[in-house]
Image: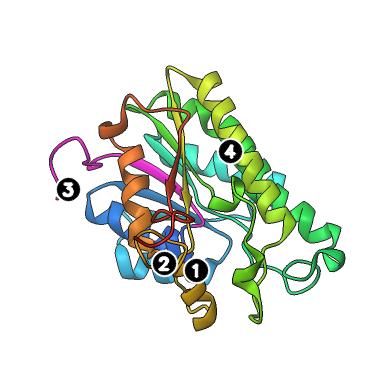
Amino acid sequence: MGSQGIFSLEGKKILVTGAAGHLGAALCDYLVRDGATVFAVDIDTSALDRLQGELNPSGDLLVIFAADLADEASRVELAISVSEHTQHLDGVVFAAAFVGTSFADGWAVDFAEQTLPPWRAALELNLTAPFHLTQLLEGLLRKGSNPSIVNVGSIYGSKSPDWSLYQGVAMANPAAYAASKGGLVQLNRWLASVLSPAIRVNMVSPGGIVRGQPQAFIDRYEKKVALGRMATEQDIVGPIVSLLSSASRYVTGQNLFADGGFEMGAH
């Protein structure tokens, strides 16, 4: 079923958080088609059901788990449930996150209006959840084959925003998003050191992914990208798959920018 060679994930068991989101769903689709067993985690139960119905109605290659990863008890329950379905994991992808449109109040607003509840929620999901779930799932990963963790970050975990991109459009870049993704960069390095050599830990930091943003924003953004366009989900799936696979068996502690050469400018 899956492709042969060092990039194949056929027969692997991979857990994906944020599985019903744009990127998570695209990744799950690839993994199932490649013959991996996917443990798909999301807070949106109806979206999970749709995902399973589209990708694997029988549930033998895609097993869904509803969980609020911003809640500590829910994370513990998830780990217990996963351990009841499998004795090992070969990979985990932390794709769940609060992003620029996740909160209506006190989130995607000017700095002076940003409030602590969404700040705390973003740190809990974007940073604390990967830390805690790695603790909870470490035992299953250590029993896997060439086990790999891939954190999904953002260019804004390492770069400051260019505010000229946002002028005149109803879009935002909250402080908590940047801070949580920046913290994830260092957590990625730290976990890679602590869990080596048994478990590899890497990060993919996407640039802007086109999802119906205002055309003015898209035009401005694409002028800052060497490849001349915003990303698609498929552009990010490839780097994640590479880091999960044996092709990257000698790679750990890295943060791969999948950003089309953002800020290099068009050639």
Residue under pointer 4:
185
Upstream in sequence: badge 3 or badge 1? 3
Q: How far apart are marks 2 and 1 (CA)?
A: 7 Å
Q: What residue type is labelled 1?
A: Tyr
Label 3 sits on a secondary structure element that is: loop
Image location of residue 203, percent across then percent down:
47, 40
Of tags 4 and 3, which is closer to the observer?
4
- The relative height of residue 32 versus residue 93 in the rendered view (above or below) is below
Of tags 3 and 1, which is closer to the observer?
1
**What span is in magenta?**
1-18
Is 150 placed left or right of 131 in the picture?
Answer: left
Q: Is residue 8 magenta?
A: yes
Image location of residue 133, percent across then percent down:
59, 38
Image location of residue 125, percent across then percent down:
66, 50
Residue under pointer 1:
221
Q: How far apart are marks 2 and 3 (CA)?
A: 29 Å
Foreground residue among 10 and 61:
10
- The relative height of residue 136 versus residue 168 in the rendered view (above or below) is above
Foreground residue among 170 and 32:
170
Q: How far apart are marks 3 and 1 (CA)?
A: 36 Å
Q: Distance between the residues labelled 4 and 1?
A: 23 Å
Upstream in sequence: badge 2 or badge 1? 1
Upstream in sequence: badge 4 or badge 1? 4
Number of other residues with Cα within 10 Å of mark 2, as a class: few under 14, some 14 to 19, many 20 or more: many
Upstream in sequence: badge 4 or badge 2? 4
Label 4 sits on a secondary structure element that is: helix
Label 2 sits on a secondary structure element that is: loop
Upstream in sequence: badge 2 or badge 3? 3
